[in-house]
Image: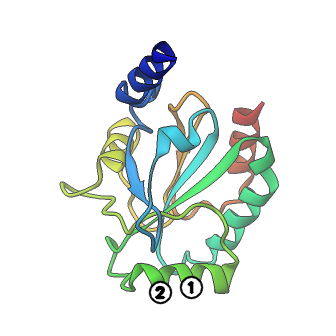
């Protein structure tokens, strides 16, 4: 009995066994006190990381992002949304307002996280790493496709819609 307890204690003290530095970040769920480690929650999945905003010309992309999530999530795919107010103040609301808008207007069910700085010196470490690997977001709805191994596969500009053939092909290739 003592050896089982010792093994459990050692496992809990060893921390996350994350094979991806890119995903080893904690974020609070949108409008919640609960935090998740991206690696713990999403390791082994194909991810589309997107910085979002509710008052942007690209905001209707929420619809396509939700459809991608619904279509591919059973195969190990997730869209991860990170609301950001970095571009012309297009995400001014509280997290509660953002959550309500996303759910009521676009039926968003994919995971959304705390309001996050995604560009410049104050960018969250995840977005700093993405910028170093590819490019920093230049506007709202910049998309980063991350493979099952936790490595960046490709980035897509904000103008590239979620169901653009290049996005769909990249997702399907990563899932196979």
Q: In this view, does 2 lie to the left or right of 125?
A: right
Q: Nearer the viewer, residue 139 or 149?
A: 149
Q: Residue at x 47, y 75 (%)?
A: 53
Q: Residue 31: where, in percent of width, then height?
A: 45, 74
SS under mark 2: helix
Q: Which of 37 and 117 is in front in this view?
A: 37
Q: Residue 147: where, in percent of width, then height?
A: 59, 34
- Indicate the quadrant where residue 64 lies: bottom right
Seen in the picture, residue 157 relative to 64 is either above or below; the reply is above
For mark 1, what is the residue? Answer: 101
SS under mark 1: helix
Q: Is residue 85 left or right of residue 54?
A: left
Q: Are marks 1 and 2 in contact (CB under 8 Å)?
A: yes
Q: Which residue is drawn at 31% across and 70% down?
A: 86
Give the Cα distance between marks 1 and 2.
6 Å
Q: Which residue is drawn at 55% across and 75% down?
A: 58
Q: Residue furthest left?
A: 121
Seen in the picture, residue 145 relative to 176 is either above or below; the reply is below
Seen in the picture, residue 152 relative to 17 is either above or below; the reply is below
- State the mark number for residue 97: 2
Instruction: Say if residue 55 shows up in the picture.
Output: no
Q: Residue at x 65, y 86 (%)?
A: 104
- Indicate the quadrant where residue 105 lies: bottom right
């Amino acid at each position: 009995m003592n050896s089982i307890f010792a093994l459990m204690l050692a496992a809990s003290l060893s921390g996350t066994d994350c094979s991806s530095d890119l995903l080893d970040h904690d974020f609070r769920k949108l409008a919640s006190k609960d935090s998740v480690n991206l690696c713990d929650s999403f390791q082994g999945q194909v991810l589309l990381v997107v910085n979002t905003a509710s008052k942007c010309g690209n905001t209707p992309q929420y619809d396509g992002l939700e459809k991608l999530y619904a279509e591919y999530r059973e195969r190990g795919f997730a869209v991860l949304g990170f609301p950001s107010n970095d571009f012309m103040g297009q995400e001014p609301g509280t997290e509660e307002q953002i959550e309500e808008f996303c759910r009521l207007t676009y039926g968003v069910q994919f995971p959304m996280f705390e309001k996050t700085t995604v560009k410049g010196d104050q960018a969250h470490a995840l977005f700093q790493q993405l910028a170093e690997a590819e490019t920093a977001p230049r506007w709202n709805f910049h998309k980063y496709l991350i493979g099952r191994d936790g490595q960046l596969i490709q980035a897509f500009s904000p103008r590239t819609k979620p169901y653009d053939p290049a996005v769909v092909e990249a997702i399907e290739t990563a899932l196979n």
